[in-house]
Amino acid sequence: MQELYSKIIRTCPLEKDFAQIYQLYLGTIIALKTPLSPTAIQALLGTETSVSNTLRLLGLAPVLLELSATTVGEHPLQIMHDTFRQFATRHPSSVPASEQPFIINKAARDEDLALRTLLVLNRELPLLASKLDAIMATTEPCDIPRLPQGVVSEVLWYSCRFWIAHLETITTPGAPLMNSLGEFLETHFHYWMILCAAEGGFIGIERITAWCEVRILKVFSFDAFTNAVI
């Protein structure tokens, strides 16, 4: 299988811009915690370019399930077989120089997805603020109803479920991530809790506090953090 994958990779151009696009699109698909549709991936990446068309141009259709689906945007994109995931995330020291640009740095992609999911939360949660406020104003805390179908986008629900999982992998967060996290904790955190509770996916705050105690309390004051999560 490795020889087959190497042949596929060798058909890809080696231009720097091409390799960066490859890293962004395929790296995102590999690092996702659960498969997303092309439409949701496009929203997550904030690009106007069709994800499906870009992946076809990259020559990656052979390693991705559902890429040839006739109804674009409805079928989750995922790696055809886990052996390609292993191939694409090999340690660079074991990879020929010609394939080096196409090795996925999963740690870097996780950090990128932590930032992108927080950007989605900061962008889309305020759009649901009136609905979420109405739920809390008229509903008992133990009986929070779900929002109507279609109100919560696929990319928003992914971000709600997995921003913490991506964040937990980061040991040295950069300034853009810290800024987005600060905005989320100070402004939108309570809406995230309401939405997760309404959709049946609230995971608690223990994992958040554990990471924050180590990584961000040196940046945010303890009082500011505790006020955000209470």
Image: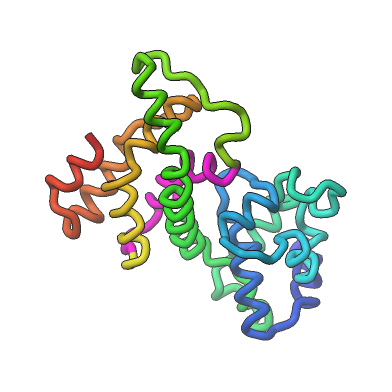
Q: Is residue 186 left or right of residue 200?
A: left
Of residues 174 and 169, the one nearer the viewer is 174
Q: Is residue 190 left or right of residue 2?
A: left
Q: State which quadrant residue 21 falls in.
A: bottom right
* Residue 155 location (% of width, % of height): 57, 46
The residue under the point 40% across, 26% down is 134
Q: Is residue 50 above or below residue 9?
A: above
* Residue 45 location (% of width, % of height): 57, 60
The residue under the point 82% across, 60% down is 62
* Residue 129 location (% of width, % of height): 41, 38
The residue under the point 83% across, 46% down is 71
Q: Quadrant of the C terminus?
A: top left
Q: State which quadrant residue 140 falls in.
A: top left
Q: Which residues are magenta?
A: 154-173
Q: Is residue 199 above or below residue 91?
A: above
Of residues 125 and 205, the one nearer the viewer is 125
Give the overall secondary structure of the magenta segment: helix
Number of dots carrying numbers: 0
Q: Is residue 199 left or right of residue 59?
A: left
The magenta stretch spans residue 5: no
**Residue lying farthest to the bottom in this orientation:** 15
Q: Is residue 140 left or right of residue 225?
A: right
* Residue 126 location (% of width, % of height): 42, 44
